Structure formats: C-alpha cells, structure tokens
Amino acid sequence: ARLGAHRTWPARPGENSVIFRQLFDRESCTYTYLLADPETREALLIDPVRAQVERDVSLLEELGLTLKYTLETHVHADHVTSAGLLRRRTGCQSVVSSVAGARCADIQAEHGRSLQVGSVALEVRHTPGHTNGCVSYVLADQTRVFTGDALFIRGCGRTDFQQGDARRLHASVHEQIFTLPDECAVYPGHDYNGRTVSSVAEERRHNPRLGGGRSADEFVQVMDALVLSDPAHMAVAVPANLQCGWLPGDEPLRSDPRMPPWAPLVRNADGVPEVSAVWTHANLSVVRVIDVRRPDEWTGELGHAVGSQLIPLDNLGAAAATWDRDAPCVVICRSGGRSGRAARLLEGLGFRHVASMAGGMLEWRSQGFEVAR
C-alpha cells in the first residue's frame, strides 16, 4: 500500500452501520483503523501514527467526521503516536490501557470497558505479553478484533522487551482472541508482507507460532530462539508514547480544543490542564474555585484562597453532580497533585472548562496573595 493510502471493504453482515477504513504507514508498516457511526458522524482512530497526522485529519474532514477517541493498543516502540497532536487539534480523548504507564491519557482503560461512538461500540480486552499494557479492541457484534501486536497475520509481536512475556502472550491470545467466533476478522497492528486481514479461524489453524494447537511451552521455545535487533526508533518512540506522542521541543498544549479559550491552559506531562496562580487570582470573580484539601489544611498554616470553596477530593464527585458543566472551575490543593486528580475527575464527568492551579497554595502564598483561615 502506498503511504497515506486507505482501503474500504465489501460489506460484511452489519457493516453497513459502520464507516471503516484501514490506513497504512509504510515506514513502520503500521495499520491505523478508522471506525465511525454514519448517523452521528462520531469517529475513533486505533493506533494513529504521528507522521500521518495530516492524512488522518484530512480524511476526517473529507468524510465529515468528528474524532471522539484515539485508541492505543499498547505503548509502541517502532513509531510515535499522534494522540497528543490529535487531542490538541480535534478535542478528542486519548485511550490507553490502565497498566501501560502512559499517565497522559484521558482514559485509562480497564479490561471489559466499552468505548462507543454513536452506535459503534468496542470492548477493551487486555492481551498482555508483547508488552505489559497491550489491549485488543473487539467490535460489539464480534465481527472484528483489532489485535495490535498481540496477534499478527501468521505471526505475533516479539516478547523480549517492554515487560514482554511469551507464556503470558500465549494465554492472552488463546483466552481473549481465539475464543472469538471463527469468522471474526482479525486486523493486526502491523504487517510486513502486504497482508491486510485474517480471521480467528485462520489464525487458530495456521498461525505458525500460536496456532495449530501449539502449547505454551512450545511457543516459549519459539520466541526464546528469536534473535532480533531493537526497533530503529525505540529510544525515541517509547518515552514519547508514554507522553501521548509529545516530543522534546514540542510546544505546550496551550488552548486545548477541549477547553475553549477561557484561560491560558497548559497540559502538563500527566495530561492535567493547568492555569497559574497569577491567572486564578486575577479571575476570582468569574471562576468557581474549589479547594480539595482536608478541612484541617483549609484552616491550617497555609490558609485558603479568598472566595474558594472547600470540597475534599473524596467528596468531589458527589458534590459536582449538580454543577453546570459549562461553568469555568479551578481546583486547588497544597502543591498541585490532588488538584490535578480532581481536574481529571471533573473532565471525566463532562466538565468543559476546568483546570488545576499549578503549584497549589504553596505557589499562591509565594505570590503574596491574600489568604483566609
């Protein structure tokens, strides 16, 4: 496939209700998958590649789609994801396994979680072994599975780095993928031989590493015998992908599209939207300021910002249930850790104008701003 090409496929049962494209990056031989609901025009991308971000944005625009999610099958070692760039440009949310270690992601996906765009739903299945944080995504009607590097067409991902474990990969594939219906289409994360799609029945029968009834012990022997060089871009790709594809020298994620320009927002390395103490002080009259510390801290040595409201972090979710999700809100704690978690919690609840105050009350006091006790 040429760089930037995309494919459409003949209709399978139920496919007329799904917009589907398979896209290819030649350098890394990575497949990116686009799925969308034809009615709502909401879309998701699985394993987007940073080098192809313009291709993907153009395709979304041409098809009139709104990107809701980017889904990673794992922390990649052979290419850099475009999740961070797409989040800034489109306002989508990034999804990574909860055990992958990429704290920048908006959604830390647990096994069994469902992700939905319109009527199109995908189930998250943890399939570790290539890396500790690998997941596969299964269409709700089980007609397709997107396996990342856990299972290739007639192969699988390597197991010799990034917490790789051959025995664990054997169990993942047999328990989470080979148990799907025979006709379920297998769409891998890569292919190096021009193949585009397989099926569960084919791989269960013909995969030379994992199929044909090969035992876990036999699979471990096969994988241990491989002598492979490191991926060419591993030293750059892994740390970048732990930051949602952000590279040294990239501009901070200012004016994040998920946050209309009500404040000079910066997303920190953990993906938390932040504003400064100076900005918060200057805008006390127009934003709700929530202090998420304990009551004894609120009345203690550091005091609290004049006009702020005390709601301890453990009580925040329940308290926010009746709040206006479009009203601007800044959360504060002692130094920024708890308020960062609070900001992400509120984002998850649908708040569109929320930020953590960087540096917390320590920074507030260092600026000499008024406090109350």
Image: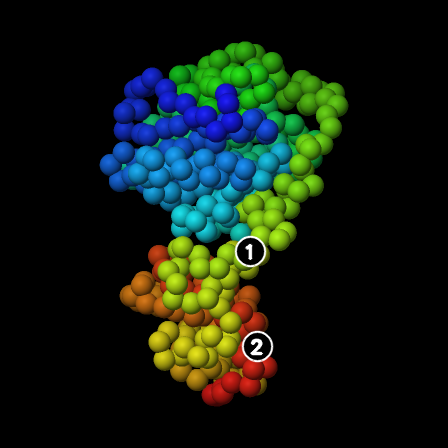
Task: Report the residue at 41% width, 23% height from top.
Answer: 7
Label 2: how many Cα within 10 Å (few below 14, some 14–19, many 20+): some
Looking at the rendering, which quadrant does residue 128 occupy?
A: top right
Residue 241: x %, y % from top left: 58, 44
Residue at position x 51%, y 59% in the image = 267
Q: From the image, tell me which residue sits under label 2.
A: 363
Q: Earlier in the sequence, mark 1 or mark 2?
A: 1
- In the image: residue 294, left or right of residue 354: right
Foreground pick, 244 / 301: 244
Residue 274: image location, x then y, percent? 49, 65
What mark, if any, has residue 362 been given in the picture?
none
Q: Is residue 214 above or below residue 116?
A: above
Q: Which residue is found at the position 54% from the left and 73% from the top?
A: 360
* Element type at mark 2: helix
Residue 199: x percent and y percent?
A: 45, 17
Viewer-side label of 1, 2: 1
Say if 92 sits above or below 31 in the image: below
Question: Which residue in the protein does label 1 denote?
Answer: 251
**181 and 340: which one is in front?**
340
Q: Is residue 156 visible?
A: yes
Q: Kindly state the secondary structure of the residue where label 1 is placed.
A: loop
What is the crowding at mark 1: few (fewer than 14 residues within 10 Å), some, or many (at least 20)? few
In 3D space, how far apart are the residues under numbered discs 1 and 2 (Cα atoms)? 24 Å
